[in-house]
Amino acid sequence: MKKALQFIAVLALFTAITAAGERSSSTATCVNKDAKLKAIDSLKTFFYASSKITSIDYTYRTSVKEVEVPLFKGEKYRMVFNRQDLPKNVEVEIYDKSWKENGRTLLYSSKDQDPSTTILSFEPKRAKNLFINYKVPPAEGSKETGCIVFVLGYQLTFIKN
C-alpha cells in the first residue's frame, strides 16, 4: 500500500511540474515540438516525466538562468537537454544547491562537450532537488534569442518486473 501511495505521489508531482512548466515557459518563439520530441526520444529506457522549454535571451554580457528540478529520493532519473534552437552555444551546468547558497557542488557541466552537440544527457547519482544553470554568452551586435528544451525521465525502482 505504501508503494502504491508513493507511485501516486510521483505521478501527481510530475503532472504538476509539467503543467507549471508549460504555462510559464511557452512563448511564441519557443514552440518547437520537433526539438522536444528529439529530447524525449533520447530518454530511451526512461519514462517521460516532464519538460520545460526555456527562452534564452542573449544580451550585451554573459548571463545565467537557473531552473530548479525537484526529484524524489530512491528513483533513477535522466535529464536531457536539446540545444538545437540556440544561435550560440549555451553551457549547461547542474548543481546540488541554488546559486544563492554557499558550498554548492557542480554535478555536471557541458563545458567539455563539442559545441556542435545538440543533445546532452545526465543521470544524477542521487535524487534530490537539483539546480540547472544555463550560462548564456553575450550577443554579438544585436540582441539574439533562442530556446533550450529540458526533458526529465524516470525509472521506478520500487516496482520489479
Image (spheres, rainbow, N blue to C red):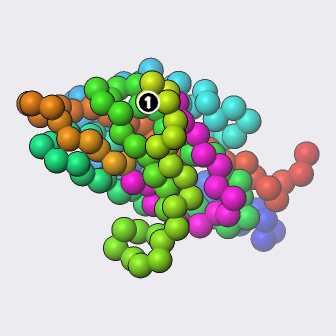
Q: Is residue 129 part of the magenta span, yes or no?
A: yes
Q: Is residue 81 part of the magenta span, yes or no?
A: no
Image quarter in which the N terminus is found: bottom right
Q: Is residue 1 left or right of residue 6?
A: right
Q: Is residue 143 left or right of residue 123?
A: left
Q: Identify the secondary structure beneath mark 1.
A: loop
Residue 147, horizontal then vertical, whole percent: 32, 34
Is residue 31 among the parts visible in the rendering? no
Residues drawn in magenta:
119-133
Q: Is residue 133 left or right of residue 156?
A: left
Residue 142, horizontal then vertical, whole percent: 8, 30
79 over 127 or under it: above or below: above
Image quarter in which the C terminus is found: top right
Who's the residue at 58% across and 40% down the image? 121
Q: Three-letter amino acid code at disc 1? A: Pro
Residue 12, horizontal then vertical, whole percent: 56, 57
13 over 142 or under it: above or below: below
| Figure quadrant of residue 53 | top left
Q: Residue furthest right?
A: 161
Who's the residue at 34% across and 73% down the image? 100
Q: Residue furthest bottom?
A: 102
Q: How many marks?
A: 1
Who's the residue at 35% across and 26% down the image? 85
Q: Residue furthest top?
A: 34
Q: Is residue 84 left or right of residue 48?
A: left
Who's the residue at 59% across and 67% down the image? 128
Q: Which residue is mark 1?
A: 115
Q: Which is more toward the observer, 23 or 65?
A: 65
Badge 1 crowding class, 10 Å Cα cut-off, few under 14, some 14 to 19, many 20 or more, is: few
68 over 146 or under it: above or below: below
